[in-house]
Image (tube, grey):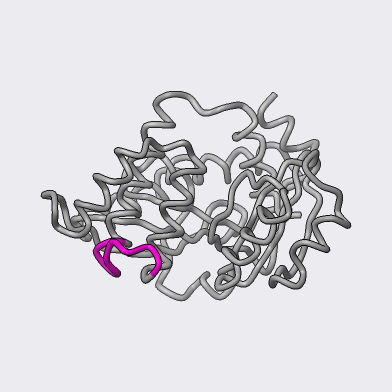
Amino acid sequence: MSGHSKWHSIKHAKGAADAARGKAFARLARQIEVAARAGGSDVDANPGLRAMIQKARDASMPKDNIERAIKRGTGELEGVTYESITYEGYATNGVAVYVEVLTDNRNRTGSEIKNVFTRNGGSLAEPGAVAWQFERKGVIALDKSVASEDDLMLATLDAGAEDIEDLGDTWQVTTPPSDLHTVRDALEAGGIAVTSADLTMLATTAVELSETSSAKNVLRVIDALEEHDDVQNVYANFDIPDDVLQAVYA
């Protein structure tokens, strides 16, 4: 199991502060704008927008916020044009880091992302340096209480699920990117409530961080990147054992 997944699970369990919630809504709004600008406002004809709207609903983003973001994307309301860029680099201990951003100023953001890596003991790498260590997947999270593993298998395998993983308090269902919504629909049709469903980048290899100090140093880089306003997602290939992760947040 990915330590990155466990780390995010702990952060989720702690609950989101109001400031973090506001930042999450701002990021989702950007993603909705970009999706609407790229493919229009019709969710049936624009699967990217459909995915972003569902993600916003899962995060309890207000309907008015979603609608305004769509209108900014389609030009019905004035808005900023954002560019999608990825950055690749390394945290400490050789941990690979893949960063997705939306920015209205490529030069400014590139310089700032480089500084974030450098200030926290990491380094920015050339395009392609670490991307090969990740693959795009659909990931669905469900509370452990909503279904047994057998029920999940019956509901999802024919719909395209690739794997079902036990993450302690939750189930994680992995799908090919194109089958994410089909599998989610199959779960909900079977009366199985979904906590979240999203496209993500999963690491194909992992660097184990068995020392608390090493884990803290890597998480410092990840946290600093996620604090940047232009950063939408950060993925890394570390694996932190449960006892070390608990010690980090003790």
Q: Quadrant of the N terminus?
A: bottom right
Q: Quadrant of the C terminus?
A: top right
Res 61 → quadrant? top left
Left or right: residue 244 compared with residue 72? right
Q: Is residue 41 above or below residue 56?
A: below
Along the viewing direction, whichever of 213 and 59 lies nearer the viewer: 59
Q: How many marks?
A: 0
The percent coordinates of residue 49 (x first, y second) are: 38, 61
Q: Is residue 243 magenta?
A: no
The percent coordinates of residue 3 (x first, y second) are: 70, 49
Q: Is residue 51 above or below residue 15?
A: below
- Which residue is pictured at 27% across the width and 55% down the height? 33
Q: Residue lying farthest left? A: 78
Res 156 → quadrant? bottom right
Magenta-colored span:
36-44
- Which residue is pictured at 14% across the width and 57% down the height? 75
- Which residue is pictured at 66% across the width and 28% down the height? 249
Along the viewing direction, whichever of 6 and 25 lies nearer the viewer: 25
The percent coordinates of residue 197 (x first, y second) are: 58, 53
- Which residue is pictured at 13% across the width and 49% down the height? 77
